[in-house]
Amino acid sequence: MPVSDDIVAAFRAHLRGDRQEWNRLNEALDRSPATTEPYFAFLTALFAMAVQRRFGNAPTDDEIIDFVADLRSREDVLADRLSADATERMITMIVRDDVMTDDIPRQQTIDIRMGVLTAIIRDEAPDATEIEDLLKGSRALADGLLS
């Protein structure tokens, strides 16, 4: 099943910083097992593309460590939810094509992807066209992963 327009619309609201619309659209999404795979594939693709945009292909370990430390210092809830080690490993996996191990629990990977994605978007403050490009590229990537 490909990524639905409803999933893209929910994340569009999130990337635009419209928390109320994000909550409304996200809560309205179909939560059946058939639709959770496209949702998580899309989140994974958004995370990967945002990390690539932020770090490029050759960040130093210090750049990743500094970013994660800054991210965790922004809000207490982020420090609680985002393990420094796991977050650094997930970013490194993207920028260095490392293999992800299965030792990070699913909910923690979701929290990390959302936290990192949100921070990168807030830091970059992309315009509407850039958000649409990110959504379009992420949808294509996720649909490719799902096929």
Image (cartoon, rainbow, N blue to C red):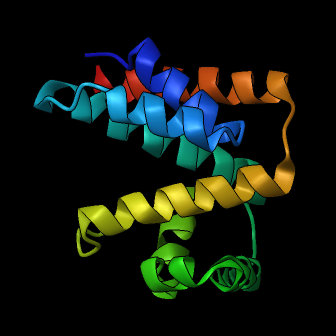
Which residue occupies 84% across, 38% down? 126
Residue 94 locus on image (x, y percent): 54, 57
Which residue occupies 68% across, 30% down? 134
- In this figure, what is the number of numbered marks? 0
Q: Is residue 91 above or below residue 80?
A: above
Q: Which quadrant of the figure contains the C terminus?
A: top left
Residue 86 locus on image (x, y percent): 43, 78
Which residue occupies 55% across, 77% down? 78
Q: Is residue 147 left or right of residue 98?
A: left
Which of 42/122 is in front? Answer: 122
Q: Is residue 89 left or right of residue 129?
A: left
Residue 79 locus on image (x, y percent): 54, 85
Residue 100 seen: no
Q: Which quadrant of the figure contains the N terminus?
A: top left
Q: Is residue 48 left or right of residue 107?
A: right
Q: Residue furthest left?
A: 33
Q: Is residue 104 above or below residue 15?
A: below
Q: Is residue 23 above or below residue 107?
A: above
Q: Is residue 14 above or below residue 58?
A: above
Which of 82/62 is in front? Answer: 82
Residue 117 seen: yes
Quadrant housing residue 138: top right
Quadrant housing residue 107: bottom left
Which residue occupies 58% across, 85% down? 76
